[in-house]
Structures are given as C-alpha cells and as structure tokens.
Image (cartoon, helix red, strand yellow):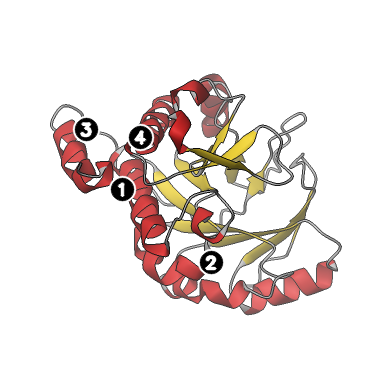
Amino acid sequence: MVAFWAVFPALLAGAMLFSSPATPVSPPPDAGYHIQFTGVLDVPGSVRLVEVDADVPRALIARLQARGKYVVCYMSAGSTEDWRADAAQIPAAAVGKPLKGWPGEWWLDIRNEGVMQVMHARIARLAGKGCDGIEFDNVDGYSNATGFPLRATDQITFNLALADSARASGMSPGLKNAVELIPDLVAGFDWALNEECVTYNECHRYRPFVAAGKPVYVLEYGDTPRARVCRVTARHGLQGQLKRLRLDAWSYRCPQTG
C-alpha cells in the first residue's frame, strides 16, 4: 500500500485547483510571543503574536486579529487527546503508549495513513477558523517511548507533510521541539517554539533557524534564574520567557536586545 504522505503533495495540488487559500504570512520577528491555554485571556499590549488552543471559538481569533494580533493555534499532531472532538476518528491500531504526565493523551503511529488524514482535516478546520499559524506539538515521537518502532526518517517525513499542509491552507507552520531534527526541518518551517532549551543546554541547536532569519521562542518552566534564561537565549538569538506549566496568563519575557 502506498503511504498517505507519498501521495499527499498531489492531493494538495488537486485541492488548490478548487480553492485559493491566502499565502501564509510568517510571524514578524519582533512581534513578541504570548501563549495562554488556561484562565482569562490577558494579552500584553506590546505583544503581537498570540498562541491559543485549537478549540477556542472562531470569534475569539477574529477579535484578536482585529486588535492587530497574529494568532497561532495549537495542534498536537503526534498524539491523540481524548477530549478532542475528532479523537474517535484516530485508528485504534495507531494509538500507542500514554504520554507521561499528561492524562488522556497517547502517542500515535505517525506512519499510519489514517493518522495523517485526521491531521490534514484538523489543519483544514484551523484554516477555517482563521488561524494565522499552527504550532505542531509532539512531533518528536521517534525519540520517545511511543509503542511503535518510529525512525527519525519517519518523523521528518511526517513533520514536513504537516508543514506543507499548513502552508497550502494559508497558515504559517511552527515546529515544537524535535531539536535533533532541526537541520532536516528548518527549511520546511517558518518559526520554532522550544521548551526548556536553557535547562537542557540545547539552545545552540537553533542556529539554523536564526541563520535563516526565522524567529525562535523559548519557554522555561522550572526554577532556572531569570537572568540565566535571558542571558542564554539572547546569546543564541532566541526570544526567551518564563511560564507556568499550566500556561496561564502569567509570564516573564526577556528584554529583546536587537
């Protein structure tokens, strides 16, 4: 059987004959970054890029955009979450081990054709909501205990297919983590979001994004001192901030230096 992603570009090309999505616009490099999934949404006036959960109402996205905000929508592409409306559409054979620390969430077999079909449909729904960009999460399953023998090449193929789908739908694709694959993925993604590269001494891995002029946003959740977070991220040309793991309104954003 031919893998879904082998015919995916052709399917996208066919779809383009019947619709003309807007050309994706990348986040402005100096837009700042605010991510919030819990609590009453409170966006600092100085920040233009706002990330919200995929399930927020379309009207909220429109209100943010009316205020001049660039809206990124969150999407877990490498896992299934049992609270999502389309969770039952994931093939049972493609559901693997649970994500440690995240109840109700399981890794997926990204090689499964049905998984890619569901992700393509999710991307289309987010485009319909008017999202400017998508943050693709859990796209590093190959380096985790998923229950499937995933290889780096499987992950690269899957991740680039996601990016192509987002771009064809008029949205800017963002890469979450997957730091070991950055050399193979940087050309396909417009920006990146990292969790705790300061803590894990991985910020240097984002040099390809910085060299390409693509913004990288770093979230640190632990007890790492603010001064160190800001010093390290600034040294590598990244935009750093501290957040609580529950992703409420609070954050401490490092000053930008150039």
Q: Residue at x 26, y 41 (%)?
A: 4
Question: For the residues carrying marks 3 and 4, which lies nearer the camera in this image?
Answer: 4
- Can residue 130 be seen here? The reply is no
Q: Residue at x 70, y 47 (%)?
A: 100
Amino acid on which the number 2 mark rests in the picture: Val
Describe the element under mark 3 as helix, strand or loop. Answer: loop
Q: Where does residue 255 sit, x and y in percent of width and height?
A: 72, 65
Sequence-first tag of 1 and 3: 3
Name the residue carrying label 3.
20
Question: For the residues carrying marks 1 and 3, which lies nearer the camera in this image?
Answer: 1
Sequence-first tag of 3 and 4: 3
User: How many marks do you count on the picture?
Assistant: 4
Q: Where does residue 104 sit, x and y in percent of width and height?
A: 66, 32
Residue 2 placement, left or right of 162: left
Q: Residues within 10 Å of mark 2 (few under 14, many from 20)?
A: some
Amino acid on which the number 1 mark rests in the picture: Asp
Residue 4 placement, left or right of 142: left
Work out how far the residue at label 1 is from the one at label 2, CA to CA, in angstroms: 19 Å
Q: Is residue 192 above or below residue 16?
A: below
